[in-house]
Amino acid sequence: MTVPYAMRPKAGDWFMRRMAFRAITVLAVAFLVGAQPVAAKEYILTSVKPNTLVLADLAARKVARTYKIAGPGPVLGIAPSPDGKVAYVVTNHWGSLVGIDLDSGKEVFHTDFSEGDLRVRNIFGLEVSPDGKEIFVLQAPVRIGRSEYHVEDTRIAVYHRDGGLTAKPVRFLPVPRRTTYLLFSADGSKLYAVNWDVTALDPQDGHVLGVQKLQHWERPNYAEPDVFGVWSQFEQSGVFVSPYFVTRTDLDPKDPAAAKTGLVTLDLKSGELKTADFENTSVVIFSSVVNPVRRNEVFSVYSTLTKTDLATNALVKRVNLPHTYYTINVSGDGKEVYTAGTQNDIGIYSTDTLEKLGEIKIPGGADQSITWVRVVKR
């Protein structure tokens, strides 16, 4: 069949269609690239006296913003919402919980624990559910009588995130005494309470789902371990880790090998609890963190920065620090480890060599004391 001359494509028409197709393709790609979310930056949340929350930009090596918290007493626990928009902090001499919007700086959540003759304090345990909808607060209540104090059962108070500035608990959960950590499993089905042992609770009704022995371990030739830890910094790896100190009962107390330092880890995805010694006790360690990329690496801090290999249960390296630090955290790419707490600086070190890479000074010279240090992505 012969195509009429008027309907035949001309060379110029072909060229224009080709150019139009390319232009549309370029625009589509540009649209898609522009639609991609900007990679979130990592910040540290810490606090200094008097009652000031601090947001530090890790890439810029400087404080990005500070937030004055109403009321007396320094900030203690810090728990960011999963989306990094709100920081929940314990304040008012451990008697109140407030939520601060990190963009506006406004208080968007507030609750006072005490009521009537019941004086209630939080002692370290604080956690936000993985879906961000509820806040779980460890509470130690004491009823004040005319001539005596009556110690009530330790409990977990659960609040809705949208409780506003007059938030009240929506339910209470029973919890063993001496609990210091509250940790959610990765899927949110279990709430771990670290106390003498590790108790898994149903976060809806507090029903005990299981207990893994820690203080009451049945380890031949070992006394009960002293698990010292009150700082939560597990968000990067999803692994809770804490140092422990223990005595060998089968050795002469004067033998250096009789005193052991080890690490207890709880994988929040699998629920597996492990304990292992890594050295004869030689230095003080306050808190530890697992590298989220090389998950066999653990970093521990006090007056030294210590690197340990979980695969071999061996000390890898240790360096002296300019002063003591109580708490520690790590970058999401596993390249930097951050020492914090006590004074007004955050140390930045290489996870590979433990070489100091820099520091962030918090203006004003106020100290961080025993505050928690959390990493948020924004």
Image (tube, rainbow, N blue to C red):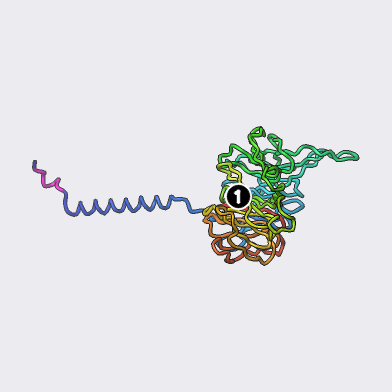
Q: Position of residue 224 (x, y in %)?
A: 71, 47
Q: 33 left or right of 368?
A: left
Q: Is residue 91 above or below residue 357?
A: above
Q: Is residue 191 above or below residue 87?
A: above
Q: Which residue is mark 1?
A: 234
Q: Position of residue 89 (x, y in %)?
A: 68, 49
Q: 192 left or right of 112?
A: left
Q: What's the amino acid at mark 1?
A: Phe
- Please say whether residue 245 is visible from this viewpoint: yes
Q: Position of residue 81 (x, y in %)?
A: 60, 46
Give yes or no for residue 327 being in the magenta stretch.
no
- Start-end of magenta stretch: 2-8
Q: Position of residue 109 (x, y in %)?
A: 67, 44
- Dividing the image into 4 quarters, which one contains the N terminus? top left
Q: Is residue 114 above or below residue 348?
A: above
| Closest to the observer, 259 or 124 | 259
Give yes or no for residue 5 being in the magenta stretch.
yes
What residue do we see at 66% from left, 43% from top?
A: 182
Q: Check disc 1: other Cα within 10 Å, few if <14, some if 14-19, many if 20+.
A: many
Q: Tell me how many marks there are.
A: 1
